[in-house]
Amino acid sequence: MLVAYLFIMEKIICSAIWYKDLKTPVFNPVNIPNGIVFCGFRHAHCLYQMCAMTGKRDCEVGESEQGFLTNKNRFVDRLEGAKIAIEAKQIEKLKFSSTQLFSEDLY
C-alpha cells in the first residue's frame, strides 16, 4: 500500500498560507516543522480563517508564506506549485505570472 502511494502523481489540492510564527498544532503537512497552515479555495479564505481563529490581523502574526497543499500532504510555495500543476496537467500554462502559481490559475 505504501509503495503505491509513492507512485501517485502529486497534484495541487488547494490554496494555503503557512503562518510560521503561530503555535504549532498537532497535525501539519509533513514538511512543515513549525507554525500552522490554513487552507482554502483561495488564499483570501486562508487569511479569513486565520483571523477568525486567532482574532489577529495578518500583520500581527509574524512571518507567513503563500502556497498550496498537495495530495501528498505537502505545503509547496508558488514556484513549486506551478511546476506540480503543469506536470500533473491541472493547467496548461500560467496566466498571471511566468513562474508562480496563483489559485486563479487553477479555478
Image (tube, rainbow, N blue to C red):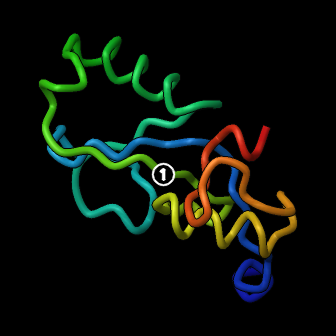
Q: Determine crowd level at label 1: few under 14, some 14-19, many 20+ residues with C-alpha closer than 10 A.
A: many
Question: Residue 46: percent from the left, percent from the top?
Answer: 46, 29
The residue sitting at 39% across, 68% down in the picture is: 31
Q: Where is residue 80 in the image (x, y as percent from the top left)?
A: 55, 70
Q: What residue type is labelled 1?
A: Gly
Q: Residue at x 73, y 63 (%)?
A: 85
In the picture, the quarter occupied by the N terminus is bottom right
Establish if 26 lies above or below 34. Answer: above
Q: Name the quadrant containing residue 15.
A: top right
> In front here: 95 or 58?
95
Q: How many marks?
A: 1
Q: Where is residue 2 in the image (x, y as percent from the top left)?
A: 70, 82
**From this viewpoint, is residue 32 visible?**
yes
Q: What element carries label 1?
A: strand
* Residue 37, above or below 81: above
Location of the C terminus (image quadrant): top right
Residue 65 relative to residue 62: left or right: right
* Residue topped by disc 1: 67
Displayed quadrant of residue 99: bottom right
Q: Which residue is found at the position 40% from the left and 25% from the top?
A: 47
Horizontal relation, residue 25 to residue 2: left or right: left
